[in-house]
Image (cartoon, rainbow, N blue to C red):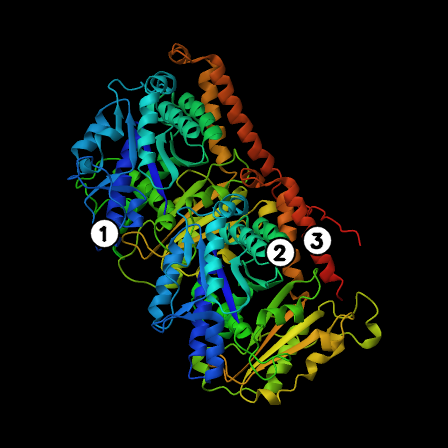
Amino acid sequence: MTQSVVVQVGQCGNQVGCRFWDLALREHAHVNKKGLYDEALSSFFRNVDSRKSDGSACGVGGRIQHLKARAVLVDMEEGVVNEILQGALSEVFDSAQLLTDVSGSGNNWAVGHMTYGSAYREQIVDKLRKAAEDCDCLQCFFLIHSMGGGTGSGLGTRVLSLLEDEFPEVCRIVTSVYPTAEDDVITSPYNSVLAMRELTEHANCVLPVENQSLLDIVSKIKHMSHGKPGPTIKRDSTIISGQGGLSEAEKPFDAMNNIVANLLLNITSSARFEGSLNMDLNEIAMNLVPFPRLHYLVPSLTPLYTLADVSVHTRRLDQMFSDAFSKDHQLIRADPKHSLYLACALMVRGNVQVSDLRRNIERLRTSLPFVSWNQEGWKTGLCSVPPVGHSHSLLALANNTCVKHRFMELRERFTKLYRKKAHLHHYLHVEGMEQSCFSEAITSLSSLIEEYHHLDATKGRFMQDSPRLSIAR
Amino acid sequence: MSVVTVQLGQCGNQVGQELFDSICSDSQDGQRKTYSSASCERFFHQTTHGDLVARAVLIDMEPKVINHSMTKAAHSGRWRYGDASHFSQKQGSGNNWANGYCVHGPRHREVVEELVRREVERCDRLAGLMAMMSVAGGTGSGVGTYATQCLRDVYPKSYILNHLTWPYGTGEVIVQNYNSVLTLAHLYQLSDAILVHENDTVHRICSQLLNIKHISFSDVNRVIAHQLGSVLQPALTADSHGAYSRNPLGEMVSALACHPEYKLLSVCTIPQMPSSSLAYSTFSWPALLKHLRQMLISNSKMEEGIDWQVRPPAASERTRSLTAGASFNTSLANLLILRGKDVYCAETGGFEDPALYTSWLSTEEAFNLWKSPVPFNKYEKSATLVSNSQALLRPLDNMVGKAWNMFASRAYIHQYIKFGISEEDFLDSFTSLEQVISSYSQLS
């Protein structure tokens, strides 16, 4: 069994991370009735016996003493981290896992990446090493951050390249929250494009998430559950609910952050729990990334909630598969059905059999355009343990060219500012930052978009099968 | 003589567990003592307490499946796996053949060889080794190939049979065609015979013949175990002189895989029906054999939707290479295994028709018959055909075609190169398999 370490950077990263740990504990409590520290728990938590003087971790199999998250929390302001430490999750983190400063990055990528990146380099590497050493077999780093600000975006991507340098063998899966067009941070396009270049070069996989999509999902659920006659929703089953977790009051953004937390829980479910067709984290990158730079995966989660009454199993199941490909369930605004699929992974949890999977794949593939050399490009995983409150769930990760539209929008917003050289001096004043950083970043983004264009051009065209090798008789 | 089984990867371990379960329950089914003890000797060794311990080594790069299989076996109460007969690591092969073959395989070579050696030493006499794996993933395919290579080095004179499960055509793993091509090309040089089950076929058997509504991998694995069991359980052969054969793998290999270019074997077992219907059904050998023969020549892998229009080409047409019956399945050699009541009355002349076979072997060499008077797995009569024919030609060709298309765009290649194989290695594998495809096409 492998372990993963979560690195949460910046305000958004830490808030999402906080929800993740809460829901992870809830999930394991639900499954782990005997209170034993098992392999599944050890993938995200250490078990520490605080009576031992060195506070070292206990091995798998004993009773749960004190669970400590395998996490590193970084923020250049203290507010968010302090709130976590005063909240219900305070026991789960060790002070050694935290790195904070006081003044923040002022929404400036350069400050986060260059200034703090250099100043805290050794401390960060130190904390990462410690977390890695506590793992028997470290498989993956999950980095959670936002793109639009200064710390998450700048320092977060600096951490990413440190991870690549120090732990080249370990997979890096990044959950990036992209700003919407109406973002109140004016310089978010600069921060995002500068960060994009780092993601393209140093991440193994990126799961882009947009606030607008999360908001839409939240309002859809609230609409369903308020004052409408008819079927009622099971309270703790929605993917926005934190009910049953440690924290009591729901804070704003909690609902949206819970969605992202659920994304991370579902991605790791097959690596933690057993099933008839396991899917490990290293298999995700292997199957979904055909070319090294094209590693942006569109996530979609279903179901959003479970109805309280029990309806026909198969029909509900098939609906779940259809929903995964509908626009309402994607975590970024994207229309994959009208772009080109390079690859698609379906991670199913719960009481679903291989025949259900096959039936739905057969049904759906006719309406989904796949690239010519990967017409049957489906990666599937079946995990027997469903998420809390559901009997089954599905996470679809699609490597689809539709992400290029988001990137093109980002490029446009960047260009609007850059043409006028607006706010540029804030960045160029920072030591280590030069104009070339900007031009290189936008070039990287443009060439990424080009690669997607190139693949899209093959769509719909009848591609001749490559001539096979012929054997001399 | 005993068979030592090496179960590799998730599929190999899941199917292997079902196989031993099926064999154990069949051999203990109130059957005749000689059959029962021959079967037990072949697949299990008995501890001093009388426990049956499977002659098996379980290998996987992550622990969940092995734990599950060992627990399931122990719960059966009738048999179990050896406590120390398994090896697992913490992290899987990531569906990457190169990771399995170049990294995990060599790293754990000694442990695997040691585990197999211990099992082999527990056998009075070794009939051979059987490696069970899938071709789609990373461990079964990559580590399995490397392990087969090691076994071939350590046991150069022993028979090595590889049982492969081919994945569903519409994907379980996106890079499954790459992994399959690399595996098959390498195994062709190492293995004595390659016995194949296709998930698509077995799935159809589950849905159309067994009427299972919600098919799970356990159902699929149980069918594979049933079919494989019916091949491997004790039988009387032409050479065994009235006793159960002591050299099943050797006899199968010499019966079917006499030419190094032709090693792919397919399996068909009839009848297959829900156990609830068994009590109400009667079987006759003529009917079973007629169906099985037509299934062979029309390349129908199950007993439903058989195309009765397909006929072997008439004698005058035999000289032309492409003839009537582009859908006619030409065989190189066949092994028919009959089990059950009145087996000595079964009339197998239909399988001795030279029209079924390619012209290089005489019918005596091409057709082989094994029998057992003991019913297998609750079926009063059952017939299994192990066939070296064109039955796998189309699936193989499809697999190579899809892999080649993907290779032409170089998609995913960077993932393999990272672990140590090159584009040259890919090209070599493609070349080997095109050769195999060409050879099988020329059988007609």
Marks 3 & 2 on one chain: yes
Read off the residue under disc 3. B434
Q: What residue type is disc 2 on?
A: Leu
Q: Is residue B140 above or below residue A52?
A: below
Which circle, 3 or 1, is nearer the viewer?
1
Towards the viewer: A429 or A405: A429
Q: Which residue is mark 2?
A: B190
Write the residue at 44% across / 58% down.
B58
What percent of the width, then of the height, locates residue B436? 70, 57
Query: Which label's residue is closer to the chain start, 3 or 2?
Result: 2
Q: Are marks 1 and 2 on the same chain?
A: no
Q: Position of residue A337 (x, y in %)?
A: 50, 45
Same chain, marks 3 and 1?
no
Q: Position of residue A41 (x, y in %)?
A: 28, 47
Q: Judge left or right: residue B58 versus residue B395.
A: left
Q: Residue at x 44, y 61 (%)?
A: B14
Q: Position of residue A138 (x, y in %)?
A: 37, 39
Residue receiving disc 1: A36
